[in-house]
Image (spheres, rainbow, N blue to C red):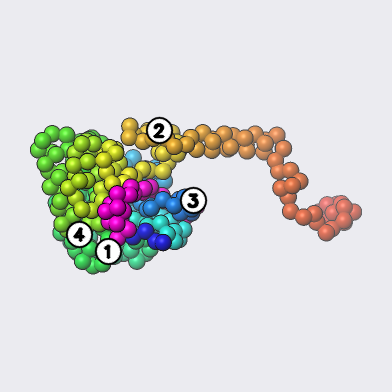
Amino acid sequence: MKTTAKTFLEMKQQGQRIAEITCYDYTTAKLIEASGINAILVGDSLGNTMLGYPDTLSVTMEDMIHHSRAVSRACSNTMVIMDMPFMSYQASVYEAVTNAGRLMKEGRGNAVKLEGGAAVKEQIKAIVDAGIPVQAHIGMTPQSVNAFGGFKVQGKGEEAAKKLLEDAYAVQEAGAFSVVLECTPPKLSELISKKLTIPTIGIGAGAGCDGQVLVYQDMLGMNMDFVPKFVKKFANVGEIMMGAFAEYMKEVQEGTFPEEVHSYVKSDCSDEFLKKLEAEL
């Protein structure tokens, strides 16, 4: 059955952990769908992982729609949540609702995600009132990297911890069906998870959250440049891929690939005809 915003709430109420993972393309989404993972996040992290940007700020609505549409085509049961890119919702409530609606209509996912706490509660409420489920995102919000002065743990001091809890309550009150906690102290994440009625999805936030989300390239060992501390490598797919590419190149250069088994049926033309054709040309 299709995972929905209601499913998320039921899983929290039943004490079931939620598994969410990023994805940006049809082929990978098909594999994730077959694995049974609860939700796919088409994250604006595609700016880093798929487009080679140094951050997520350059990602456009067109980028998000393009990748979301590809992922959504692969998913019958997996919930598809789509990130709203930088400046697609911050300027006004009207723009937030308009862009969320566009992402749903053209990206064909099941929910949108946006960053920020109390500062965007009016946007969340308006989007939810328009019939669009919203996953909130607080703590280390990558779109605010310049304001934070880098990618830093949030909620460490007493005032910061209080502010984070207030943000969590604000997004819940605004109607978000879940909230991502990124790079927050584990004890604080666990407290927030206990206080909220909606599920918390952690990334670098400890085991006390109601679920977890990871970037799939990180957890598969495909990111060769940088791996955050909170990532566990569940496989070294990157090494396997590089080995396969190198072996392919080797066999092509040696002439051992392709073999006869990799070719289509033989031509109906006789050898004599082909020799004649060669001579004529």
Is 263 in front, or is 161? Answer: 161
Q: Earlier in the sequence, mark 1 or mark 4?
A: 1
Q: Helix, strand or loop at disc 1?
A: loop
Left-right relation of 162 to 68: left
Asked whether the beta carbons under mark 2 and mark 3 sit within 8 Å of each other, the answer is no
Spatial CA span between label 2 and label 1: 36 Å
Residue under pointer 1: 132
Asked whether the beta carbons under mark 2 and mark 4 sit within 8 Å of each other, the answer is no
Spatial CA span between label 2 and label 4: 38 Å
**Residue at position x 17%, y 47% from top?**
195
The residue type indicated by label 2 comes to: Asp
Left-right relation of 29 to 132: right
Residue 123, disc:
none
* Residue lying furthest front: 14
Spatial CA span between label 2 and label 3: 24 Å
Measured as percent of width and height from the top left, residue 160 is found at 13, 38
Q: Residues within 10 Å of mark 3 (few under 14, many from 20)?
A: few
Q: Earlier in the sequence, mark 2 or mark 4?
A: 4
The residue type indicated by label 4 comes to: Gly
Residue under pointer 2: 225
Residue 31, disc:
3
Q: Residues within 10 Å of mark 1 (few under 14, many from 20)?
A: some
Q: Does 206 appear above or below 62? A: above
Spatial CA span between label 3 and label 1: 26 Å
The residue type indicated by label 3 comes to: Leu
Magenta span: 5-28
Is 165 in front, or is 209? Answer: 209
Nearer mark to the viewer, of 2 and 3: 3
Measured as percent of width and height from the top left, residue 240 is found at 54, 36
Residue under pointer 4: 175
Regarding residue 47, the answer to whether it shows in the image is no
